[in-house]
Image (cartoon, rainbow, N blue to C red):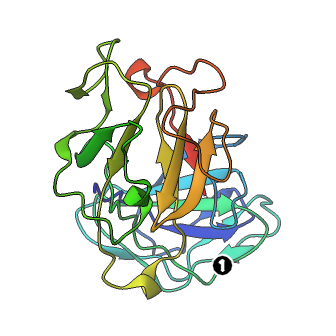
Amino acid sequence: MNTLLRKTFALGILLFLLKINAFSQIVINEICPSNVTTIQNSNGDYDDWIELFNAGGSTVNLQGYGLTDDITKPFRFTFPSFNLASGRRVLIFASDSTSNVIVDHYEMPVNGLGSWKYKPGSAGLDTNWRNLSFNDGSWSSGNGGVGYGDGDDNTTISATVSVMMRKTFNVSDTSQIAKAIFMMDYDDGFVAYLNGYEIARANLNGYPRPAWNTLASSSHEAQRYQGERLIRFS
């Protein structure tokens, strides 16, 4: 996965204050004063945020730097010891709380545009395909998305009611996962499973598991190729 050069803290402030001996290479790069749907913090809330950027050529430790939304009360939040490397960014959430969890970066163990194992739906499909132990060696391989008919797919298949897609990945140290986020671009509906357990679905009925020929509840066009945002599930 692409590694995003972002780190997160939770706090409740707005104005960046520097110590007298601070480096001017730390700048406020971007502010979102009305965050409604863009980025969630570690608690799943859409708090306003401030992005700091190290525009200089060396690493800066932000310990002792402060942020505030009231000039008469400077340093309402003071940074812990934290190194912001040259060319890196740090995202600050104005949440009126402080988190002790520092997210160093995001990892993407599954890239939707990467290589997948896939198989069109049929009455003969082995329903164990959702499980970790399933052997998908006989399935076809191709890059996502997989589909037909509208020219926005990396792997084109024949017309079908449904297609099953599988991806196996490893997380070497699960203790380092602060939060897992699933993002999906789909046409027209989907159900996602992790090791056999449903983790997300949209625009598709049929419980507990839809049959291979269950149709989507309504039409829904994929968003990413149109420049729109993906649907996010935390």
Q: Relative to 79, is 217 on the left or the right?
A: right
Residue position for label 1: 99
- As rendered, which of 76 and 170 lies closer to the eye? 170
User: Is residue 200 visible to us here?
Assistant: yes
Relative to residue 112, is residue 210 drawn left or right?
right
Q: Is residue 49 above or below residue 149?
A: below
Pointer 1 local density, CA inside 10 Å: few below 14, some 14–19, many at least 20: few
- Give the x, y percent position of residue 143: 21, 39
Q: Residue furthest front?
A: 124
Q: Does residue 25 appear anywhere in the picture?
A: no
Answer with left or right where residue 83 lies relative to residue 67.
left
- Against 195, residue 156 (above or below) is above
Q: Name the residue located 52 percent from the left edge and 76 percent from the top edge.
A: 178
| Amino acid identity at mark 1 | Ser
Quadrant including the N terminus? bottom left
Depicted 7 relative to depicted 160: above or below? below
Q: x%, y% of residue 223?
A: 48, 25
- Using the rendered view, name the quadrant where residue 220 is placed: top right
On the picture, is 58 further left or further right than 222? left
Disc 1 element: loop
Name the residue: 59% across, 43% down. Answer: 210
Residue 111 locus on image (x, y percent): 31, 50
Residue 148 vertical placement versus 51 (above, below): above
Residue 37 locus on image (x, y percent): 67, 40
In front: 26, or 19? 26
Q: Name which residue lies at 51% across and 31% down.
A: 213
Q: Quadrant of the C terminus?
A: bottom right
Image-quadrant location for residue 152: top left
Q: Which residue does the image show at 33% across and 44% down from the upper left?
A: 112
Along the line of sight, the residue nearer the viewer: 116 or 177: 116
